[in-house]
Image (cartoon, rainbow, N blue to C red):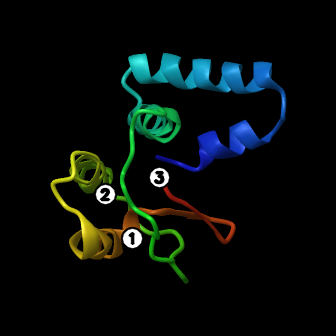
């Protein structure tokens, strides 16, 4: 997933603009664009109030920029956290091991919680 969609969402505070950006992402996803599919998947995971990953503290990332993102392993990690297949220190260690897939843009780390 490119930071392109996040940048487009941040262009305006208008609700209608944000709906239009999501509509564009949905149209591209239906045409098979993988970046749009990942954006929509992670947006759904982020804003669905019934999805919880049961982490109190997410390890901080420093100095990670322009890393290659392995979205499949990140999706598996989210699934394991949500279903509580991994918990406690094991969950924290799994997140630390997967830190390179966190999106770092302009010094801000975006983490799906």
Instruction: For the residues labelled 3 and 2, say whether their Cβ atoms are less than 8 Å apart.
Output: no
36 to 73, vertically: above or below? above
**Disc 1, SS:** helix
Question: Residue 6: which quarter of the image?
Answer: top right
In whole angstroms, how far apart are the C-alphas of marks 3 and 1?
A: 16 Å
Mark earlier in primary sequence (2, 1): 2
Callout 3 environment at 10 Å: few (<14), some (14 to 19), or many (20+)?
Answer: some
Q: Quadrant of residue 30?
A: top left
Task: From this view, report whether residue 67 is shown above or below residue 2.
Answer: below
Mark 2–mark 1 Cα distance, whole angstroms, equals 8 Å
Task: Determine whether label 2 and label 1 are within 8 Å by CB.
Answer: yes
Read off the residue under disc 2: 70
Q: Is residue 89 left or right of residue 14?
A: left
Whichever of callouts 3 and 2 sits on the residue coming sooner in the sequence is 2
Q: Check disc 3 and report the residue beneath it.
A: 113
- Disc 3 element: loop
Q: Residue at x 24, y 55 (%)?
A: 73
- In this figure, which residue is indicated by the disc labeled 1? 100
Residue 3: x percent and y percent? 59, 50
Image coordinates for residue 107, horizontal then vertical, percent: 66, 72
Q: Left or right of 32: which side holds 20?
A: right
């Amino acid at each position: 997933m490119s930071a392109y969609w996040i940048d487009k969402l941040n262009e305006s505070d208008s609700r209608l603009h944000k709906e239009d950006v999501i509509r564009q992402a949905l149209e591209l996803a239906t045409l098979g664009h993988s970046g749009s599919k990942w954006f929509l998947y992670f947006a759904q995971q982020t804003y669905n109030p019934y999805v919880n990953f049961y982490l109190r503290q997410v390890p901080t990332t420093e100095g990670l920029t322009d890393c290659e993102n392995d979205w499949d392993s990140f999706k598996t990690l989210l699934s394991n956290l949500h279903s509580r297949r991994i918990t406690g220190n094991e969950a924290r260690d799994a997140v630390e091991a997967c830190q390179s897939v966190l999106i770092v843009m302009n010094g801000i780390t975006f983490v799906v919680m």
